[in-house]
């Protein structure tokens, strides 16, 4: 990608983070840490990689995205809104009773959501089904899914991995948002995912490892996945939980709580300064 395109992606990602914080603050609850760590990948998928059309969100030939770690939907909502699927003002009603945007993705209530998710491990199963359906129907759409690193402790993830490999789902690309933290502490202390790359290799995946905040590495990995034949691809993206907000970065306490008014102002000011620097 050229420098101007890279700059636009960085600015968009900053806006995704701004609206993520806006949503969680107005909800007075939610999951900012993992939403912020995933923001760059969300941005790349919706603003560069995926064939989607906000004017026709159910187009049968569209690419699909499944947020298997569904609790981190604030950044997905932000990306969808900025892409034009619904007004950004909807984000301010996140998690409110009767609002369109709930605490986990709802495919029946929110334009652009391809699969309802929230129970960890289940989203990747649905993504495998979508990829197999594409194969059986002769469609050339691609399916993207995002797992959390802590989510990879779920057995259903590995059942899905076995299924994907067995069915040669080379139209499936799985991201693992590997920020090293989960609700109960570090992933290493809770269950440990050492040699995650080798685990996926053993299940028959093409495995790529990247910096999940580097757009050029994200692009290279996504493009590489498109060339892989006969097996699915997993992209293990090393990220920082709470990325972009200084006091949230790499802090397990920001897995699942909202900032208060003072913390909200600090976060928004930091992100606005980052955006301003990019626009200078």
Image (cartoon, rainbow, N blue to C red):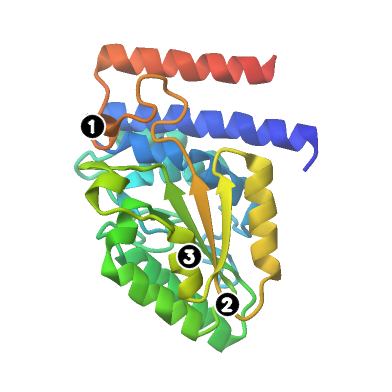
* Residue pointed to by mark 1: 257
> In terms of sequence position, does the residue under pointer 2 or pointer 3 come before the other?
3
Residue 101 at x, y = what percent? Answer: 32, 45
Q: Is residue 118 above or below residue 82?
A: below
* Residue pointed to by mark 3: 198
Q: Which mark is residue 71?
A: none
| Left or right position of 79 against 156 | right
Q: Is residue 114 above or below residue 218?
A: below
| Disc 1 to disc 2: CB gap under 8 Å | no
Residue 84 seen in the figure: no
Gap between marks 1 and 2 measured at Cα: 38 Å
Residue name at image x 62 percent, y 81 percent:
230
| Disc 2 to disc 3: CB gap under 8 Å | no
Where's the N terminus, which quadrant?
top right
Residue 206 at x, y = what percent? Answer: 58, 68
Residue name at image x 42 percent, y 18 percent:
268
> In terms of sequence position, does the residue under pointer 1 or pointer 3 come before the other?
3
Where's the C terminus, which quadrant?
top right
Residue 66 at x, y = what percent? Answer: 43, 60
- Point out the frontmost of discs 1 and 2: 2
* Label 2 neighbour load within 10 Å: few <14, some 14-19, many 20+: many
| Left or right position of 56 against 146 | right
* Residue pointed to by mark 2: 231
Gap between marks 1 and 3 measured at Cα: 33 Å
């Amino acid at each position: 990608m050229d420098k101007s395109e890279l700059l636009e992606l960085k600015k968009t990602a900053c806006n995704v983070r701004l609206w993520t914080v806006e949503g969680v603050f107005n909800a007075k609850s939610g999951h900012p840490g993992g939403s912020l760590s995933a923001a760059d990948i969300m941005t790349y998928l919706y603003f560069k990689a995926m064939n989607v059309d906000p004017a026709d969100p159910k187009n049968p030939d569209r690419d699909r995205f499944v947020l298997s770690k569904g609790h981190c939907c604030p950044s997905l909502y932000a990306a969808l809104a900025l892409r034009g699927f619904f007004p950004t003002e909807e984000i301010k009603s996140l998690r409110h009773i009767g609002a369109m945007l709930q605490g986990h993705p709802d495919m029946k209530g929110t334009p652009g959501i391809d699969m309802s998710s929230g129970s960890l491990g289940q989203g990747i199963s649905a993504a495998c089904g979508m990829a197999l359906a594409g194969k059986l129907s002769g469609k050339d759409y691609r399916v993207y899914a995002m797992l959390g690193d802590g989510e990879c402790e779920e057995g259903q993830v590995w059942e899905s991995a076995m299924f994907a490999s067995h069915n040669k789902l080379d139209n499936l690309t799985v991201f693992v948002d590997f920020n090293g933290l989960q609700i109960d502490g570090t992933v290493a202390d809770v269950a440990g995912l050492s040699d995650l790359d080798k685990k996926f290799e053993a299940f028959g995946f093409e495995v790529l490892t990247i910096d999940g905040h580097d757009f050029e590495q994200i692009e290279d990995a996504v493009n590489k996945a498109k060339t892989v034949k006969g097996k699915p691809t997993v992209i293990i993206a090393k990220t920082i939980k709470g990325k972009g907000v200084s006091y949230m970065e790499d802090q397990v306490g920001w897995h699942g709580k909202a900032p208060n008014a003072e913390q909200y102002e600090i976060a928004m000011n930091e992100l606005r300064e980052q955006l301003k620097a990019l626009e200078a």
